[in-house]
Amino acid sequence: MTADLIKRIFEPHFSNPILLTGNDFAELIIKKGRIVVSTDSHIVQPLFFPGGDIGKLAVCGTVNDVAMSGAVPKYLTAGFIIEEGFEIQNLEEIAESMQAAAKEAGVDIVAGDTKVIEKGKGDGVFINTTGVGVLEEDFHIGGENARPGDAVIISGTVGEHGMAVLSARGDLGLESQIQSDVAPLNGLIRQLLHVCPDVHVLRDPTRGGLATTLNEIACQSDVCIQIQEKNVPVLPAVRTACEMLGFDPLYVANEGKVIIILPETQVEKALKVLHEHPYGKKAQRIGGVKESPKGRVLLHTALGTNRILETLSGEMLPRIC
């Protein structure tokens, strides 16, 4: 029955020469460069939400994690843990969504696994993905590379993913048109690095949002990051929903945005190339990197005061990605 499920659902959508060899492994040919690997597990609830679903999220999330190194994502593996009784039609929709996202990102799903567990023990479906990319250029991009004097850019508005998922749960108590921003960012990042090869840090602000991710970078690099509240782009619908629920959009998850930290001299060029890409049209410079206080993130508020942005100690919204 598992073999039939694979042939009926997964093979038609994920078919490629490597996968169709039918082995328990995938042989990948890498001509030159360094290998970048990332893995992630996806447990979002609900499985389908405005702007995406768990399948699109699984592909885009792992593609983006690989791309944050400057590497070109090439291959994915996908493992499915499916609850007994899960609707085949829903599984097919998820597979179709993964196929479309993989095609947009230019990656092949080359290996995978399927397990079925007893009803009541799996909450529908969980997906684990591993991404493999190739880093051919001599990029050295990482959270430890932010330097005093650098500028901080965000590629677009923040908070849509978390609010879209919460809306789909019915927890908002209001009608909302907010769509998740889930998207593969490797194309955007390639265009950026072609013009600005001296980027120091790339990071996607997923769980914990912009504020928590900036704290991670500040600690890795032992610097202070200061951002301007008025410069952080937030959609009016997201801001309204956050105000009603007592959330801070700076801590709400994103799945299609990237934080870019690079030398001040490259800001203008970076913003120009970002604005030319569909996923970077609302990119803005939001702040800069300073020497001290080390390991801190400061928000310069609209009132002219400074506020310390701490790391989110728990998950504001569980089961978000």
Image (tube, rainbow, N blue to C red):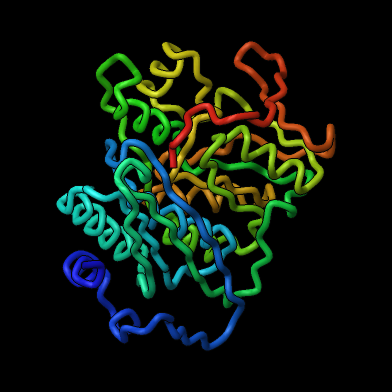
At a point 43% along the width and 39% down the height, the residue shown is: 282
- Image quadrant for the N terminus? bottom left
Task: Tell me which corner region of the image, top left, top right, bottom left or bottom right, holds residue 311.
Answer: top right
As drawn, 91 above or below 13:
above
Residue at image x 66%, y 60%? 141
Residue 198: image location, x then y, percent? 66, 61
205 vs 165, nearest the viewer: 165
Q: Position of residue 11 (x, y in %)?
A: 23, 72
Residue at the farthest front position:
118
Judge from the rendering whether residue 284 lies leftward or rightward of residue 261; answer left or right. left
Q: Is residue 94 above or below residue 319?
A: below
Front-lying residue, 48 or 253: 48
> In the drawing, does residue 196 fall left or right of residue 321?
right
- Would you say 116 lies left or right of 148 here? left
Relative placement, left or right, of 238 versus 87 is: right
Q: Residue at x 84, y 32 (%)?
A: 293
The foreground one among 288 and 91 is 91
Work out which quarter of the rendered image holds the C terminus and state it: top left
Counting labels gives: 0
Q: Which residue occupies the foreground of this view, 86 or 184?
A: 86
Relative image position of residue 284 (x, y in whole percent)? 52, 38
Residue 136 spot, x, y in % from top left: 57, 77
What residue is shown at x 69% (from left), y 42% (from top)?
216
Q: Is residue 210 above or below residue 201?
A: above
